[in-house]
């Protein structure tokens, strides 16, 4: 077993069980046992304990209750929306008692600050709705209204943009597009209408090699080349590749540049660095050493992407 995989298996239960599932030949019962620990140990357990009886985290839905609304571009990651995104990313089993309790509180009580709608009915911005739809699908909640809103908001170029007052012919955003794609795929990728929307959205990214402007051929944003974790609402090529390994298992050649970029970032140890931290208050840090140091979360995502691309066999699981 490689040093990198051993490094991942020594991490938080959320990293451990996904490493076993995605990178090793561990038997299904061992993976399930490792996943069960997510609800009771580590990051997810800490986060579950921070939920209030009213279903919210830190007194708010999208932003914490203490946030100053006059700071329009201030990000904070401690409120309900991003806490739920984290629980989904950790792989908390939706069937677990802990998940049922937490999600039941959200479904019954949590409303959007925007208009008072129930959380699983969605908001208006596609970047927010995409994440909320992915959460709803993952935790088996009726989020059909969010899906309908996202389908109606798709732009003519195939992507989405968080500025909902723009005309459909306006250029889309990489950030909003990846959020919408993740949500719609999780909700109903086999539905014909949704499948068509997904295809158009994926083509938006692929036609731009996942990081270049279509008209200029230049990098849209150098930060797109920098792996981050957690991703929040932000786009980067690792997030896009991790999506496409599931959505396009046939390995579209337009991913090749992004794959080469990712491969070049791998250290001799087999690990990958956290290169971009999305600033804002958090409950706790996932990678204690921080930006510029190896990251279990980035390494897990990168290794499963490269395994998909290289069609590599899983490593032997040693228990």
Image (cartoon, grey):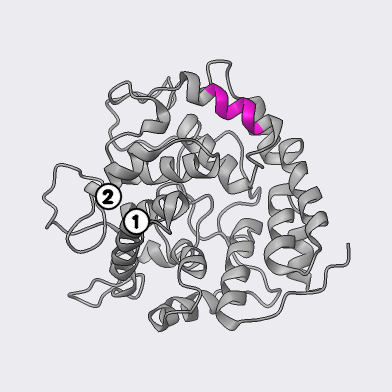
Residue that carries the numbered disc 1 in the rendered image:
194
102 in magenta: yes
Helix, strand or loop at mark 1: helix
Using residue 81 as the reference point, say whether residue 93 is left or right of it: right
**For marks 2 and 1 on the same chain, the one whose residue lies earlier in the sequence:** 2
Location of residue 49 in the rendering, given as x and y in whole percent from the top left corner: 67, 26
Q: CA distance from mark 2 to mark 1?
A: 7 Å
When the figure is inspected, residue 84 is found, relative to residue 300, above or below; the finding is above
96 in magenta: no
Instruction: State the residue in front, 196 or 316.
Output: 196
When the figure is inspected, residue 63 is found, relative to residue 266, above or below; the finding is above
Name the quadrant of the C terminus. bottom right
Location of residue 28 in the rendering, given as x and y in whole percent from the top left corner: 78, 59
Number of residues whose C-alpha sits closer than 10 Å to that of mark 2, classed few (under 14), some (14–19) or many (20 or more): some
Helix, strand or loop at mark 2: helix
Name the quadrant of the N terminus. bottom right
Q: Residue at x 61, y 81 (%)?
A: 311
Q: Magenta residues, as a range?
A: 99-105
When the figure is inspected, residue 251 is found, relative to residue 46, above or below; the finding is below
Location of residue 86 in the rendering, given as x and y in whole percent from the top left corner: 56, 42
Q: Residue at x 43, y 59 (%)?
A: 190
Instruction: State the residue in front, 35 or 231.
Output: 35
Location of residue 152 in the rendering, given as x and y in whole percent from the top left corner: 22, 47
Q: Contact, CB < 8 Å: mark 2 with mark 1?
A: yes
Q: Which mark is residue 151?
A: 2
């Amino acid at each position: 077993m490689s040093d990198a995989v051993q490094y991942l298996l020594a991490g938080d239960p959320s990293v451990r069980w996904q490493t076993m599932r995605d990178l090793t030949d561990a038997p299904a019962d061992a993976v399930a046992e490792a996943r069960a620990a997510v609800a009771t140990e580590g990051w997810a357990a800490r986060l579950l304990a921070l939920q209030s009886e009213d279903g919210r985290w830190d007194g708010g839905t999208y932003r914490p209750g203490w946030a100053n609304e006059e700071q329009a571009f201030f990000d904070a990651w401690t409120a309900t929306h991003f806490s739920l995104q984290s629980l989904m990313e950790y792989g908390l089993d939706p069937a677990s008692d802990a998940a049922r309790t937490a999600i039941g509180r959200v479904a019954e009580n949590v409303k959007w600050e925007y208009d008072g709608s129930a959380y699983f009915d969605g908001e208006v911005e596609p970047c927010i709705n995409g994440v909320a739809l992915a959460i709803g699908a993952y935790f088996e909640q009726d989020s059909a209204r969010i899906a309908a809103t996202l389908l109606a908001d798709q732009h003519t170029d195939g992507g989405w943009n968080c500025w909902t007052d723009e005309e459909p012919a306006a250029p889309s955003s990489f950030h909003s597009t990846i959020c919408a794609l993740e949500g719609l795929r999780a909700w109903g990728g086999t539905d014909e209408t949704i499948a068509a929307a997904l295809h158009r959205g994926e083509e938006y990214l692929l036609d731009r090699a996942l990081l270049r402007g279509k008209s200029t051929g230049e990098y849209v944003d150098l930060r797109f080349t920098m792996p981050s974790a957690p991703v929040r609402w932000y786009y980067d090529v690792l997030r896009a590749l991790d999506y496409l390994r599931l959505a396009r298992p046939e390995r579209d050649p337009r991913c090749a540049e992004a794959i080469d970029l990712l491969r070049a970032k791998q250290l001799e140890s087999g690990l990958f660095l956290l290169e971009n931290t999305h600033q804002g208050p958090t409950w706790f840090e996932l990678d204690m050493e921080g930006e510029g140091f190896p990251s279990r979360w980035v390494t897990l995502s990168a290794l499963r992407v490269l395994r998909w691309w290289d069609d590599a066999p899983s490593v032997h699981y040693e228990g």
